[in-house]
Amino acid sequence: MKIYVPKVVVMQLRFERGTIRIAGNLRVPCSVWDERSRTFRAMALHYRDIIEFLRSSGIDFKDEVMDLLPCPRLQSRIVLRDYQREALDAWVANGKRGVIVLPTGSGKTLLGIKAIEMLNTPTIVVAPTIDLVMQWRSRLREEFGADVGVLGGGLRDVKALTVSTYDSAYIHAEHLGNRFGFIIFDEVHHLPAAGYRSIAEMFASPWRMGLTATYEREDGLHEELNRLVGGRVFEKRVKELTGTHLAPFRIERIVVEMNDQEREEYEANQRIFLNYLAGANLKMRGPADFQKLVMRSGRDPNARRALLAKNRARDIAYNSSSKLDALAEILKKHSSSRIFIFTEHNRLVHQISRRFLIPAITHRTPGKERSEILERFSSGVYRAVVTSRVLDEGIDVTDADVGIILSGTGSRRAFVQRLGRILRKRDGKEAVLYEIVSADTNEIRTSHRRKQALKIQTD
């Protein structure tokens, strides 16, 4: 007589295009049934949780998820400052996952490099701009003496240490999501955006680090970071590092009067806008209300006219000729300083560049030219650079000590990042950030919102 011995099915985990295929017909946390493959599946994001569940449950399984790239021994000469060591320890205590929030110029890159050394595993760093990608690549090469791959800017070179733009990481995530044990998201506030969040979802990397100077997003999506990376584990504000690790600073607001023609045009356009709001019983209390107006403008000619008038009024205030006169005085006063000039739109960038013979950087500036301008700025060949929003992130210039905001939104993030461009410490340095705003316009309110960002950082 034959004795029936039931077949033991060992669970098998395999990476497939950004997901984990779970063979063995056992539903594990975060998995769903996939009718096509007749197995359960989970996003690669949940790999670590699944492994922990199976081990703690005493379930036999075969793990074929990770296919790590060969990695050399990674050692650096970096010695962390006290607050950086505290940040790294907090990240380790959280299971080597989570977001570290530190002001611009406080050495977030060094933290990432030290974490790479600690883990000694294939690592991919994801950054928002090609400038930041190349900056990371340079630092990683310098510290580890290893080849560093790049994804982005027309390059596709994958190594044990690889740096990628968010766009390229999104494109390649389903194929590369099991090749790296560690993933670092620089400027991690970009990650929760639709599309980009799938990078974190399709990478199985068990260890994750987010780096940013500004954790909160105005749309509230920063709450997604807890799921995607591990949430905020450490934070230091500007005030806590000023004078010891960041340069002391002051902020000066200069209010200028528009000329008669500018004032007349500004008020005429404001009347059109405000009259429409009153007639339509609309109030502008925040982004959601403004979005309602934008949606109305698609079907209501008067709403469109009001929206265009609002934009014209804003542009008049942003580009007042009196601002350039005030800028001339600041440039004269700080004739020996390194100066960044920030504007909202490219038209004013080019106007300033022509009038004061200052090199300009916009989103249309080729990468090679941009690098040359910043190198000459760092070396002292150029004493000033004027730029629109393209350099709010991704520049590492140690000696800038004066910032001038001629126009910009009330975004807290942009303001904190622009302030951070001038806070790198140097003996005897006091940084100064100027805001030049048009009197009796909505720019005053915008400036107030920026001040709220500073209050949060310095309270």
Image (cartoon, rainbow, N blue to C red):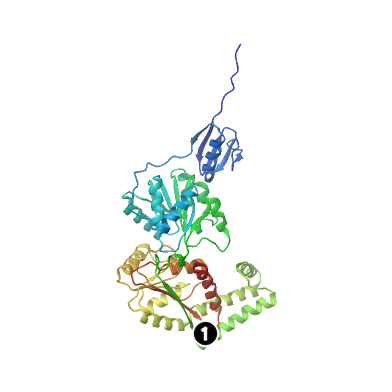
Residue at 59% across, 80% down: 270
Q: Kindly give the residue lying farthest to the top in the view shown.
A: 1
Q: Nearer the viewer, residue 118 or 209?
A: 118
For this view, does 436 lie left or right of residue 77? right
Residue at 32% across, 67% down: 378
Please indicate, yes or no, whether residue 71 appears anywhere in the rendered image. Answer: yes
Q: Residue 388, how many percent across, how many down?
A: 44, 70
For this view, does 271 lie left or right of residue 237? right
Please give the residue where the numbered disc 1 appears in the rendered image: 262
* Amino acid type indicated by mark 1: Glu
**Quadrant (top left, top right, bottom left, bottom right) of the N terminus:** top right
Q: Residue 104, how many percent across, how many down?
A: 43, 64
Please indicate, yes or no, whether residue 165 appears anywhere in the rendered image. Answer: no
Residue at 31% across, 68% down: 376
Q: Is residue 254 above or below residue 235?
A: below
Q: Nearer the viewer, residue 251 or 185?
A: 251
Q: Is residue 159 above or below residue 375?
A: above
For this view, does 12 lie left or right of residue 35? left
How would you rate the neighbour count of disc 1 (Cα within 10 Å): few for under 14, some for 14-19, many for 20 or more? some
Q: Residue 366, how many percent across, how many down?
A: 38, 64
Q: Quarter of the image holding residue 221?
A: bottom right
